[in-house]
Image (cartoon, helix red, strand yellow):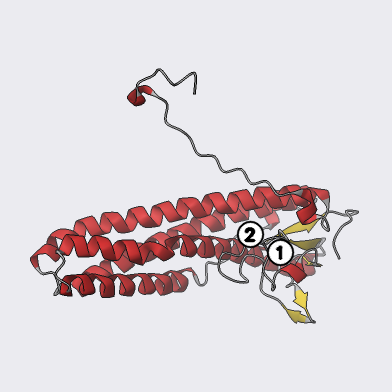
């Protein structure tokens, strides 16, 4: 404050936002110390990617709406369906992009952790993006239909097209943060699980070592479904079990899931 207080606002340096994730040690008390640090790094990476996805989704749809406004002003109601489809396409494209970026980031993280566990990182291969397009299409359809209904309601109420479109965008975008959090976490989990399953299959053929993995979650904020899974172990490339049945992967249990999974090194203690 003292250093910047006398400077004109136009000459002051712009602030830089850096996300730092800190997890109290007692929240992860049942997992090895190294896993606690890895969990904090993974959580910070996840949230930073979610924030970036949220920003991109809002920017992409706002730019598309600006492009569509002249046509909406000419034919407020007749062009509503086409505008909604165009907004949905921009939304879906950005979701696919976000999932691709998240997959690449998670693959690099899995490879780095595999190397720290004594595995050859080159044996960890990218997983096929099997359902990215379908998931993007589903959330985009929900967004575009919500926008269309809100926009038409505004026009019917006598609002100008631009005002109605902006109002509809504000309300339709309420779920953007949730979509960003859910899709990034799901893409992280899908890439990690796909790469691990491919490695495990190759390991069985070639006699490679297969380490254990451990479920990690912040107990104070974990849901009732995820909390019993904390510190549970399974083989890398195999599903976690609950009541002897496969359980959804960490990060994909529910919307905005913050759980993570990490490899366990030989001799590390903590967890069941």
The quadrant where residue 217 appears: bottom right
The residue identified by callout 2 is: 125
Q: Quadrant of the C terminus?
A: bottom right
Residue at figure coordinates x 32%, y 68% from the top left: 88
Percent position (x, y) of residue 92? 38, 66
- Whether residue 62 sits left or right of residue 49 in the image: it is left
How far apart in space, not on screen, are marks 2 and 1 (Cα)?
A: 7 Å
Percent position (x, y) of residue 132? 48, 68
- Whether residue 57 sits left or right of residue 111 in the image: it is left
Residue at figure coordinates x 11%, y 63% from the top left: 73
**Quick check: can you spot residue 243?**
yes
At label 1, counting other C-alpha atoms closer than 10 Å, the crowd grade (few under 14, some 14-19, many 20 or more) is some
Residue at figure coordinates x 68%, y 46% from the top left: 22
- Disc 2 vs disc 1: Cβ atoms closer than 8 Å? yes
Residue 64 marker? none
Percent position (x, y) of residue 187? 55, 63
In this rendered view, identify the residue nearer to me: 189 or 68.
68
Q: Is residue 224 above or below residue 268?
A: below
* Most distant residue in the left direction: 74
Q: Is residue 240 above or below residue 56?
A: below
Residue 199 marker? 1
**Quick check: can you spot residue 205?**
no
- Whether residue 222 sits left or right of residue 99 in the image: it is right
Residue at figure coordinates x 27%, y 72% from the top left: 150
The quadrant where residue 189 appears: bottom right
Q: Earlier in the sequence, mark 2 or mark 1?
A: 2
Instruction: Kindly state the secondary structure of the residue where label 1 is placed.
Output: helix
């Amino acid at each position: 404050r003292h250093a910047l207080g006398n400077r004109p606002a136009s000459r002051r340096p712009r602030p830089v936002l850096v996300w730092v994730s800190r997890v109290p040690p007692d929240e992860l008390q049942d997992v090895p110390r190294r896993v606690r640090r890895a969990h904090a790094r993974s959580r910070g990476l996840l949230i930073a990617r979610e924030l970036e996805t949220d920003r991109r989704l809002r920017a992409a749809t706002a730019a598309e709406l600006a492009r569509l406004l002249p046509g909406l002003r000419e034919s407020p109601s007749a062009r509503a369906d086409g505008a909604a489809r165009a907004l949905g396409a921009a939304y879906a494209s950005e979701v696919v992009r976000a999932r691709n970026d998240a997959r690449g980031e998670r693959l690099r993280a899995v490879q780095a952790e595999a190397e720290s566990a004594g595995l050859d990182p080159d044996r960890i291969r990218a997983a096929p993006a099997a359902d990215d397009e379908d998931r993007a299409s589903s959330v985009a359809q929900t967004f575009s239909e919500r926008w269309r209904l809100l926009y038409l309601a505004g026009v019917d109420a006598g609002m100008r097209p631009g005002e109605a479109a902006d109002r509809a965008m504000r309300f339709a975008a309420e779920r953007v943060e949730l979509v960003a959090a859910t899709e990034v976490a799901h893409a992280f989990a899908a890439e990690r699980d796909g790469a691990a399953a491919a490695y495990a299959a190759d390991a069985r053929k070639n006699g490679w070592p297969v380490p254990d993995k451990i479920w990690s979650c912040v107990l104070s904020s974990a849901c009732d479904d995820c909390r019993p899974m904390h510190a549970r172990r399974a083989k890398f490339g195999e599903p976690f079990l609950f009541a002897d049945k496969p359980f959804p992967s960490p990060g994909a249990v529910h919307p905005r899931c913050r759980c993570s999974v990490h490899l366990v090194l030989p001799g590390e203690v903590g967890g069941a």
